Image (cartoon, rainbow, N blue to C red):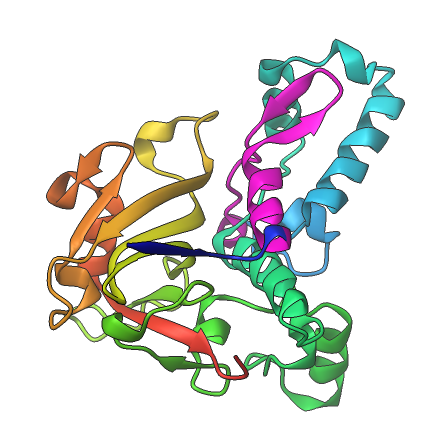
Amino acid sequence: MNTKILSEHAISVIDQYIHFNIGGGTCSIPYFNNKTTRNRVALRTFIGKGSPKDIHDEIGAILIKTHILQQSLTDETLKKLLIENNIGIDCSAFAYYVLNAENKERGKQTLDKHLSLIHCHGIIGKIRCALRPTENTDVQTFADPKNSKIIQIEHIEVGDIITMIDLPTQLGDDVGSEHDHILVIHQIKYQNFIPITIHYSHAVAYPEDGIYGTGVKQGTIEITDTHKPITEQRWIENGKVQEQNRLFIRAQKSKTEIRRLKWW
C-alpha cells in the first residue's frame, strides 16, 4: 500500500485556509458566496477570491483601523471579525490557489499562464481578465475542455479535480453556475497501484453549518469499484456517508467528473 500527496507548498495553502492565524486567534476562513452580490470589481478579498496572504493583510489593516491588538484575538473573535467584514473564500478561488501552488512546484509557472478564461470576450474583457485572473476563474472555467480533460478513476492522481456542474432543470431552464462546485484531490491511497481512497479539500457552506461553521472542509471517497463512476463510490465527510452526505447528494444531481489540467 502506498500514498501520494500534493506538494508541501500546495498542502500549506490548504492548511492556511483551514488554520488561518493572526495573533492569538486561529480559525478556518469562512465560505463566501459571491453569487448573492455578483460583484466582480471589488477587491478580491471582499468577493471570496483572496489568498491567505491577501486576507491576512486585510485583517491586519482592519485591526489597525479599529485599534484592536492582534494578541487580543481569540479563535472566536477572529472568526467573527472575518464574517462581520464579509471576508471569505469560494470554492473556485480555493481551488485556484491550491492548484497554482502545485503548478509552480511542477515547474509550470503560475496558473494564469495556462488557463483559458472562457468568460472573457472582446479586447476590454481580455484585458480585464489578464489583470484579474483569479476573479474570472470559476468552476466552469476549470471544467472546460480548453483547460482540463476527463480522467477515469483507475488513472486518478493528486492534483486532479472533481467538478460538479449544475444540470438544466426538468423545465429546460439552464441553472447556470450558481451551484457549480469543485473539489481538489490532495491525497490518494493505493493498493497494488489501484486507488482505494481519495482525499479531497473544498470550500463549502452547508445549511447545518450556521454562520460560523462554513469554510474549507475535507473528506474521503472510498473506491469500491473502479469500473463504476465516481458518483457510485462511498463518499464520507464529517462522519456522514452516502445519502446522509450533502456533497454526495450534490454529486448525484450534477454533471460530476474527475478532470486533470491539460498541461500536467
Which residue is found at the position 43% from the left and 28% from the top?
213
Looking at the image, residue 191 sits to the left or right of residue 86; the answer is left
* Quarter occupied by residue 24: top right
79, 234: nearer the viewer = 234
**Res 135 visible:** no
In this rendering, the answer to whether 164 lies above or below 8 is below
In this rendering, the answer to whether 209 lies above or below 175 is above
In this rendering, the answer to whether 178 lies above or below 24 is below
Which residue is found at the position 76% from the left and 31% from the top?
59
Number of marks in picture: 0
* Quarter occupied by residue 112: bottom right
259, 60: nearer the viewer = 259
Q: Position of residue 49 (x, y in %)?
A: 63, 53
Residue 134 colored in magenta in the image:
no
Segment tinted magenta in the rendering: 9-36
**Res 70 visible:** yes
